[in-house]
Image (cartoon, rainbow, N blue to C red):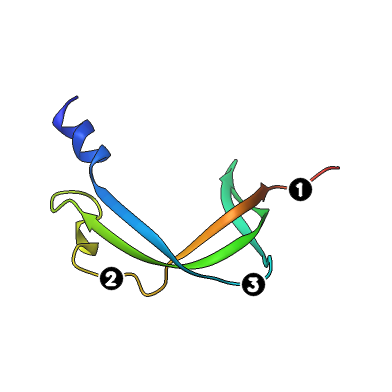
Amino acid sequence: MSRAERSAYDCAQGSYRQAARIPGHPTLTAHLAQQRQGETCLVPLNLIGSPSLTTARLAFASDGPLAFLDGHKPLLSLAIRRCRFTVGAAHI
């Protein structure tokens, strides 16, 4: 593995531990913006799952693209379990 490949692979490391489950199965609806033939296309995006608050530890390579984040702590960490993620219109 070359240095560039190793650097891209090792640019970040993290771990998390579940702290508390959040009741319910909220749905997040948003749009994904994409460029298509010179125009911006908004694609619907839906996420539903069981969220949990977590504690997270992150570390970033000092020479990697995310080096500016090294030493910072996440303000909020969530894990989504039993997740269903849909991009585009769902046809049933």
Residue occupying the point 25% across, 39% down: 8
Taking depth in this image into account, of 20 and 86 the one nearest to the observer is 20
| Identity, as a three-letter code, of the amino acid under mark 3 | Pro
| Identity, as a three-letter code, of the amino acid under mark 2 | Lys
SS at circle 1 = loop
For discs 3 and 2, the disc positioned in front in the rendered view = 3
Pointer 2 or 1: first along the chain: 2
Q: CA distance from mark 3 to mark 2?
A: 25 Å
Label number found at residue 23: 3
Residue occupying the point 16% across, 26% down: 2
Task: Tell whether 41 sits left or right of 71.
Answer: right
Label number found at residue 71: none
Measured from the top left, where is residue 42 in percent x and y?
A: 65, 55
SS at circle 2 = loop
Q: CA distance from mark 1 to mark 3?
A: 27 Å
Q: Residues within 10 Å of mark 1 (few under 14, many from 20)?
A: few
For discs 1 and 3, the disc positioned in front in the rendered view = 3
25 lies above or below 9: below
Callouts 2 and 1 close, C-beta under 8 Å: no
For discs 2 and 1, the disc positioned in front in the rendered view = 2
Q: Residues within 10 Å of mark 2 (few under 14, many from 20)?
A: few
Q: Which residue is mark 2?
A: 73
SS at circle 3 = loop
Q: Which residue is mark 1?
A: 89
Q: Residues within 10 Å of mark 3 (few under 14, many from 20)?
A: few
Pointer 1 or 3: first along the chain: 3
Q: CA distance from mark 2 to mark 1?
A: 36 Å
42 lies above or below 23: above
Pointer 3 or 2: first along the chain: 3
Measured from the top left, where is residue 49 in percent x and y?
A: 64, 58
